[in-house]
Amino acid sequence: MSEPLLPTEFADLEPFAARWCIPTEAARYRERLNSTMIDMQAFYDVAFPRVRAAMAYLDTFPLQELPEPQENLLHLVYSLIMVSLPVEVWHQPRVIDAGTAYFDRHLEPVP
């Protein structure tokens, strides 16, 4: 069994960690596009009720000095944000009526 990726306080989110603790926005977007709505809904249903607790927990650490488990939790929250519109509004991984449009970001928010 591998080491947990998340802080023990968020062990209930661990089943989603390997897939959704993604460090870059472009990679999170790719994962969203390659995911089914069933997969995203399952992640959303478990993670969304915990997001306020996760943010309150992360606020107790200096942002630029997050230990690895806490940084993974932050990446998981970022992934939750990435899937929230497809789950709540569009009911599909892609933006509705966007065709093949793509926005390529050259700078990443850090961390």
Image (tube, helix red, strand yellow):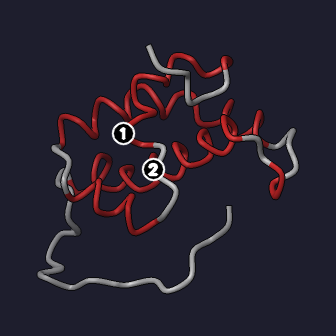
Q: Is residue 19 above or below residue 88?
A: above
Does 20 sit left or right of 40 as displayed? Answer: right
SS at mark 2 in the image? helix
The residue at 23%/36% (across/down) is 39
Quadrant, the N terminus: top left
Determine which residue is flagged by label 1. Answer: 19
Q: Nearer the viewer, residue 22 or 86?
A: 22
Q: Is residue 7 above or below residue 64?
A: above
Question: Nearer the N terminus, badge 1 or badge 2?
Answer: 1
Q: How many marks?
A: 2
* Residue 27, image x, y percentages: 38, 62
Q: Nearer the viewer, residue 18 or 59?
A: 18
Res. 100 image quadrant: bottom left
SS at mark 1 in the image? helix
Determine which residue is flagged by label 2. Answer: 79
Q: Amino acid at mark 1?
A: Arg
Q: Amino acid at mark 2?
A: Ser
Question: Label 1 vs label 2: CA separation?
Answer: 10 Å
Res. 37 image quadrant: top left
* Residue 111, image x, y percentages: 68, 61
* Residue 104, image x, y percentages: 38, 84
